[in-house]
Image (cartoon, rainbow, N blue to C red):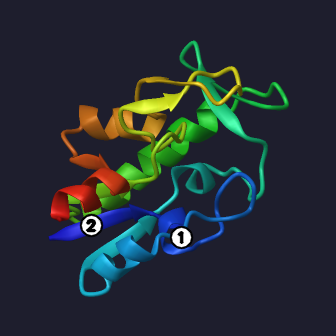
């Protein structure tokens, strides 16, 4: 099996706030696995750190009111190309993200309210038939 993993989950400081979501349980699993790291937001040209973004009415808007939809789609397209080239079997992602959120994302009001939905990258992956899963659900199913 080959995996693609949200870069923030392995400790790469690529989150909007310049930090990461390093997960020791996931790193322990990945220790003997073949994987690549991905970050559609950075790959799409957004800086780290950057203003927090959420999806609102099919657009990605940041806390400064700027529409960053183009960057999100560009990064998603580039990472999907890599995933296909690398022959990745499953993509393990950070939950709730406007890029990588799978099943639940923030509602676009920056009020920490979760709604049903997928991030830009996840939607594109699903449309391409690429298997995606939140890393926490994946680890729970391993047990």
Numbered disc 1: secondary structure: loop
The image shows residue 21, relative to residue 119, as above or below, that is below
**Crowd class of label 1 (few under 14; some 14 to 19; many from 20; radius 10 Å):** some
Horizontal placement of 16 versus 80: left or right?
A: right
Q: Earlier in the sequence, mark 1 or mark 2?
A: 2
Which quadrant holds the C terminus? bottom left
The image shows residue 13, relative to residue 80, as above or below, that is below
Q: Which quarter of the figure has residue 53?
A: top right
Give the number of the disc on residue 132.
none
Which quadrant holds the N terminus? bottom left
Residue 46 in the image: state x and y as whole percent.
69, 50
Most extreme residue toward the top is 57
Residue 66 in the image: state x and y as whole percent.
79, 28
Most extreme residue toward the left is 1
Residue 71 in the image: state x and y as whole percent.
62, 40
Instruction: Kindly identify which residue carries mark 2.
Output: 3
Numbered disc 2: secondary structure: strand
Residue appearing at x 57%, y 12% in the figure:
57
Numbered-mark total? 2
Residue appearing at x 45%, y 45% in the figure:
95
In this orientation, which residue lies closer to the viewer: 13 or 67?
Answer: 13
Horizontal placement of 27 versus 75: left or right?
A: left
Residue appearing at x 50%, y 39% in the figure:
96
Mark-to-mark CA distance, 1 and 2:
16 Å
Give the number of the disc on residue 22.
1
Q: Nearer the viewer, mark 1 or mark 2?
A: 1
Q: Which quarter of the figure has residue 125?
A: top left
Horizontal placement of 135 versus 7: left or right?
A: left
In this orientation, which residue lies closer to the viewer: 96 or 79?
Answer: 96
Residue appearing at x 73%, y 40% in the figure:
52
**Crowd class of label 2 (few under 14; some 14 to 19; many from 20; radius 10 Å):** many
């Amino acid at each position: 099996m080959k995996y693609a993993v949200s870069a923030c989950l392995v400790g790469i400081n690529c989150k909007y706030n310049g930090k990461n979501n390093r997960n020791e349980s996931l790193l322990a699993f990945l220790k003997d696995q073949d994987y690549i790291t991905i970050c559609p937001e950075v790959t799409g040209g957004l800086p780290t750190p950057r203003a927090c973004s959420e999806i609102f009415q099919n657009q990605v808007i940041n806390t400064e009111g700027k529409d960053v939809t183009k960057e999100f789609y560009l990064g998603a397209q580039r990472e999907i190309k890599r995933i296909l080239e690398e022959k990745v079997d499953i993509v393990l992602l950070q939950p709730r993200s406007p890029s990588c959120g799978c099943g639940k994302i923030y509602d676009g009001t920056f009020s920490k309210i979760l709604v049903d939905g997928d991030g830009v990258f996840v939607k594109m992956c699903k449309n391409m038939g690429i298997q995606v899963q939140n890393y926490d659900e994946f680890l729970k199913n391993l047990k």
